[in-house]
Image: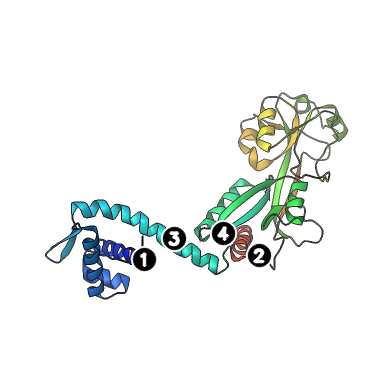
Amino acid sequence: MQKTQLSQWSALQAVVDEGSFEKAAIKLHRSQSSVSYGVQKLQESLGVSLLQVQGRKAQLTQAGEALLRRSRSLTSMAQDMEQFALNLKQGWEAEIHLAFETVYPYADLMQVMAEFERHSRGTRVQLHETVLSGSREAITEKRVDVAILAIVPQGFLGHKLGVTELVLVAHPDHPLVLASGLIEESELSQWLQLVIRDSGTGEYKEGGWLKAEKRWTVGHFSSAVALLKGGTGFAWIPRHLICQELQTRQLATINLTHRATFELSFHLVVPNPTGAGPAAQLLAQIIQQHHLS
């Protein structure tokens, strides 16, 4: 669709929406004669009548109604493309990458991304869920524009956002839960532990209690929770993921001598702050503001 045709269709849409050529001209910041001429030329090029004037009000013909419905989506797409091209010209990124640790609360993530989408100007977002050294690699190799992780790699600056609580849990019928008295940490090594697979490609590991001789590794906390509910193993799980399971006694905490929970801080890191584009900067800003509110 040529630019002239887009202008003509926009004129027709304004006439219909506003109810008259005069009001359409005001809305479009054009003269009434140019709006009228645009609609007339559109009808001539199509060879069909689109409008009929009754008194002072312009109404669509049957053919006009059918064509107008299609024209709205076409003009909207064209306007979006023009705006997106302008955004790119101004340096607004076509796509950005966000890495976030699996322990980061999904409720926070959803609110952050919903806010970003309202101001994203069409920028696509690639979300990367990372674990342990996978988070470190995403930053040190600068494969992402923004990252939320537990441990900030050396040489990078992090902004603390908050904390998440991890709980040591198992099925209510698990011997570690049923045991009378407190459990010594050394006793855990006799039982099957469920751990989340490190998403990194190297050998670097950090964090987590990994002393159990028997250990199963899964790719995601949801897999671990399903196994725990089925009576298999014990694991450290973010509390926000199992609130319902704890309330309904599908899972229960294991009472260690020293602790059954611990808090893990998470931080915001922009790996290349001087080279971050406006979309990446906006996303980082939204994340910070979300945790300040």
Q: Mark 3 packing: few (<14 Cα in 10 Å), some, or many (20+)?
A: some
Question: Is residue 39 or residue 186 the one in the foreground?
Answer: 39
Vertical side of 71 occupied by 20: above or below: below
Residue under the point 25% across and 73% down: 34
Residue 63 visible somewhere in the drawing: yes
- The residue tagged 3 is 80
Residue under the point 44% across and 60% down: 80
Q: Quadrant of the N terminus?
A: bottom left
Q: Residues within 10 Å of mark 2 (few under 14, many from 20)?
A: some
Residue furthest out toward the right:
186
Amino acid type assigned to the residue bearing label 4 in the image: Ala
Q: Quadrant of residue 237?
A: top right
Give the percent coordinates (x, y) of residue 37. 23, 70
Earlier sequence position, callout 1 versus callout 3: 1
Q: Earlier in the sequence, mark 2 or mark 1?
A: 1
The numbered dot on residue 94 is 4
Mark 2, residue position: 276
- Local SS, label 3: helix
Picture quadrant where residue 91 is located = bottom right
Q: CA distance from mark 4 to mark 2?
A: 13 Å
Element type at mark 1: helix
Q: Label 2 is placed on what type of residue?
A: Ala
Q: How is the image coloured?
A: rainbow
The residue under label 1 is 3
Label 1 CA crowd tier, 10 Å (few <14, some 14–19, many 20+): few
Placement of the C terminus among the 4 image quadrants: bottom right
